[in-house]
Amino acid sequence: MSPLAGKTALVTGGASGIGAACARALAERGARVTVADRDETGAKEVAAEIGGTAWAVDLLDVTALETLELETDILVNNAGVQHVAAIPDFPPERFRQIMTLMVEAPFLLVRAALPHMYHSGGGRIVNISSVHGLRASAYKSAYVTAKHALEGLSKVTALEGGPHGVTSNCVNPGYVRTPLVDKQIADQAAAHGIPEREVVEKVLLTESAIKRLVEPAEVAALVCWLASADAGMVTGASYTMDGGWSAR
């Protein structure tokens, strides 16, 4: 039997990158997946591919999320954005937007999902954090702050959810081969004043012992394990997948 047969899953930012890989992997293991993304076309394409459901949603509209009720067994908080700038040049409105999307929205989705999980006797929450949830890098004040906050939210959720059979964990990849990282290469080149061809080696992977980008499917495989019955005693944890970056 498929390990996630009969389970429902919701993946935010599911139209591309890590989110799409998670949606596909969860569906392959038997879950019925809702692909949530503000990119309605992309969400529908992934949902059609995996036999799931598309949910076109703008997670920045947090007021609409305050009364949301989610009936899902697995919640994957993945949606995120990046902005690279020195603190004096960082637009305050952009900082607030990143906090809203990557901290407040996951909180509201967890809040909406827990009652059903408690009632059904269990659930899995997997937060796609980052090595930047554990370490800092220059020029990424909003992203690093948001990921550190997500780590705290995940641990509190683990403590509150544990007695109800709900686990909550973070996955902490290094740089993953996604459109978001492709965009960062150009931004980092401008911030550091170096050619784009040098960004991957000298900036993105300078702290990594393994000199390659993480593949989305590798992140998805760990997400699926955390969502499975085999990980029933794993909660409040942060799983690094950073090629040795955080070993330093």
Image (cartoon, rainbow, N blue to C red):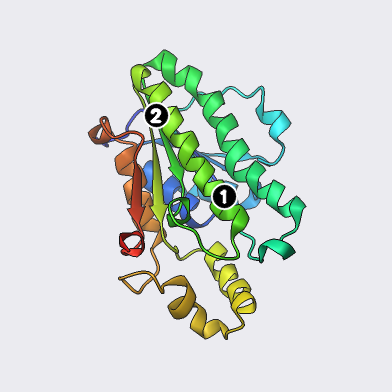
Which residue is rendered at x = 36% and y = 72% of the image?
Answer: 212
Q: How many marks?
A: 2
What percent of the width, then of the height, locates residue 32? 43, 35
Which residue is rendered at x = 64% and y = 78% of the image?
Answer: 190
Mark 1, secondary structure of its residue: helix
Q: Earlier in the sequence, mark 2 or mark 1?
A: 1
User: For the residues carrying marks 2 and 1, which lies nearer the camera in this image?
Assistant: 1
Work out whether residue 193 or residue 83 is closer to the camera in this orientation and state it: 193
Work out whether residue 86 or residue 172 is closer to the camera in this orientation and state it: 86
Point out the image quarter for the N terminus. top left
What percent of the width, then of the height, locates residue 79? 56, 47
Name the image quarter holding residue 64: top right
Give the side of residue 104 with respect to residue 23, left or right: right
Mark 2, secondary structure of its residue: helix
What percent of the width, then of the height, locates residue 201? 43, 79
In the displayed structure, 215 sits above or below 159; it is below
Name the image quarter holding residue 56: top right
Alpha-carbon distance for marks 2 and 1? 20 Å
Amino acid at pointer 2: Ala
Amino acid at pointer 1: Thr
Give the side of residue 210 with respect to residue 27, left or right: left
Give the side of residue 215 with respect to residue 100, left or right: left
The residue to which callout 1 is attached is 145
In the displayed structure, 233 sits above or below 204; it is above
Q: Give neighbour class at mark 1: few <14, some 14-19, many 20+ (Cα, 10 Å).
A: some
Does residue 37 show up? no
View extreme (top): residue: 119
Which residue is rendered at x = 66% and y = 66% of the image?
Answer: 86
Name the image quarter holding residue 154: top left
The residue to which callout 2 is attached is 158
Work out whether residue 22 or residue 130 is closer to the camera in this orientation and state it: 130
